[in-house]
Every structure is written in structure tokens, then in C-alpha cells.
Amino acid sequence: MRVPSLSARLVLALLAFCGTVVGSRAVAIGVDAEAGKVVRKASRFGEYVQYLPRQEPRGVLVVVHGMPTEKEAKDIAGLAEKFLGRWVGFAEEQRLIALAPAFDDENFDSVEGVHGGGYRGLFGRQIGADDFVDGIVATYRPSLPGWDGRIVLYGHSAGAQFANRYCVRHPDRVRAAAISAAGWFAMPDPSAHWPSGMGRWKTSFRWDPARRPQPVDVTPDPAGWLRAASLPLTVIVGTTDTEVQKARDGHRGKTRVDYGRQWVDDMNNLARARHEEGRVRLVLVEGVGHDSARLTPASQKALSEALGPGRGRE
């Protein structure tokens, strides 16, 4: 039996996720043509942006955008595309398929009256933000024989909040992560409830005034924090990112620098207390504020060091 080509395997998986029926041969040609290009895609639960490296890919990079402005929210895929565009060179160097989910207001915005109820807390109206990402990633699995399924993860600001929470909830799905300028972390603290810590969070969300509240009951597994502490995770913050943040349960200090330093220290202390090696580190970028573009080189350097040259799938 003939084994489908890389493009054909990718097409079949994409069709399953997107719910689209198209002739496989015609689509395969389109996928071949997409190599080396940033392309917007649609799925059942929202949009995302794709970059296929020109060489045979070895793994997957997920790039998570920050909270959009009112203008950016009108074209959320455009914001995801802007973020992904900064990672094209890295994706080529590491031979990674780069994917940027577009977290739109309708499905993934912060919930009315509940801070942290949107994608930064891994929540969504129809599907969890983490499940949305996992579904996108899964469509590319058939095109990556030998890949162990662990992603390389980057997020900035609200995207970094998503990233640190994804790491502690799904540490077995992460190869390495760069967490850029997060103003809120899931601390390794059982006295603070999710999304600020390990504790159970039982509440309800009202996504809009016209609908009934949606019950939410989150009970994180504390073991996820310990497993995440053994991963090469890097928190990147600019030294002038000193805007005072909202007080958070389980958080010490006032700024993103304070919160980032605390998370790194507490995660490594958690590992040491269990006689494990903590691999979480903090990188401060001198003279930079809350600027995703200017922090990206430090994020890429951290991930390059974690992966090594051309080692995106190991």
C-alpha cells in the first residue's frame, strides 16, 4: 500500500480538525506551496496562523500572542500573524512547524466580572484554550514521524500567562518554554486557587449577560508543578517593566519583575525540596519595558540554548 506523502498526511489531519471536505490531491499541492510562507488557517473553534519550514520539520513551535487592543481584536488573526512573523527564522533554524492560535474575544476573552477567565487561564466558551491549541497541534502529528509530541512554547504578556499555566497543567506536552513578561503566574502554592496557584477553583462564568452562568470546577494536579520545574523554562522580563500590577493571591511584590523572580525561585525551591533539579531560570533584559518585539530575541536565545542547534524534536 502506498504511504501518503508528508503533504498528504498533513492535509488529511487538517481536514479532520477543520471539518472541511476537499480533494486531497488539490490540497496537497496547496500545502506544498505553503512551505516558507505565513498562512492563516481556520478551524472549527477559531483561527490560527501557520508557518511550514522549507526543510523536513522535526517538531512544533506554538507562539501565543498577548492581549489585543480594541483595534487588534477586530483582526485577531492579524495579531497572531504579527507575533508568528518574528519567529520564522527560528522555525527555519530549528526545523519546526510554527503555529500561532488566534484567541478571539467571542470565544476566549476574559469573562465578564471574572479576571482570568479567558485564554490566559486556559478557559474558553466552547473549548478550553489549552484544548484548542492541542487540537491544532494534533493535526500536524501525522506529518512528524518520530516526533514525541512535545511542543516548544512561547508566549508574551497574557500569552505568557497562558504559557506558564499550560506548562504546569500539561508538563508532559512541553519540550521547552519561553515566558515573556507575564503579569500573573500559577504559583506552586496550594493556598492560592487556580489560576493563581495549585488550589481548587469552583466558580461560574457568565460569558455575556444574555446567557446563563457556566459552572467551572478546576482541581489542578500539584504534581504538574514539580514536573514543570524539571523542564527548561525561561522567564524573560525587561528591567524597566515596572508598572505596578494588581495584587494576586500567592504573589509577592508589585511588578512583573517581582512576580517573575518569585515564580522562578519558588519553582526551583519546589524541585529542591523533592530532591529534584530545578531548571527554571530568569533572564532580565536591560533597558527594555513591556515590549514583545524587543524581548523576542532573548526568548529565542533561551529556546535555542534549551534545544540546541537543529534539535527541535528531541
Image (spheres, rainbow, N blue to C red):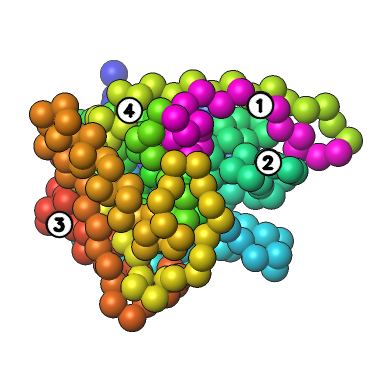
Nearer mark to the viewer, of 1 and 4:
1
Question: Is disc 4 placed on a helix, strand or loop?
Answer: helix
Q: What is the spatial separation of the Cα atoms under label 3 and label 4, in whole angstroms?
A: 23 Å
- Amino acid marked by disc 1: Thr
Marks 2 and 1 in Cβ contact (< 8 Å): yes
Residue drawn at x 52%, y 60% as measured from the top left: 245
First in sequence: mark 3 vs mark 1: 1
Question: Is disc 3 placed on a helix, strand or loop?
Answer: helix
Disc 4 packing (10 Å; few <14; some 14–19; many ≥20): some
| Magenta-colored segment: predominant secondary structure | loop
Q: Is residue 206 magenta?
A: yes
Where is residue 205 drawn, in percent x and y?
71, 32
Q: What is the spatial separation of the Cα atoms under label 3 and label 2, in whole angstroms?
A: 38 Å
Q: What is the spatial separation of the Cα atoms under label 3 and label 1, in whole angstroms?
A: 40 Å
Side of 219 relative to 36 (left or right): right
Q: What is the spatial separation of the Cα atoms under label 4 and label 2, in whole angstroms?
A: 24 Å
Q: Is residue 23 magenta?
A: no
First in sequence: mark 2 vs mark 1: 2
Q: What is the spatial separation of the Cα atoms under label 2 and label 1, in whole angstroms?
A: 9 Å
Looking at the rendering, which quadrant does residue 255 occupy? Answer: bottom left
First in sequence: mark 3 vs mark 4: 4
Residue wearing tag 3: 305
Q: Which mark is residue 203?
A: 1
Q: Which residue is at the front of the view, 78 or 214?
A: 214
Residue wearing tag 2: 114
- Amino acid marked by disc 2: Val
Question: Is disc 2 placed on a helix, strand or loop?
Answer: loop
Q: Which residues are magenta?
A: 191-209
Residue wearing tag 4: 224
Where is residue 268 drawn, in percent x and y?
21, 42
Where is residue 216 drawn, in percent x and y?
63, 24
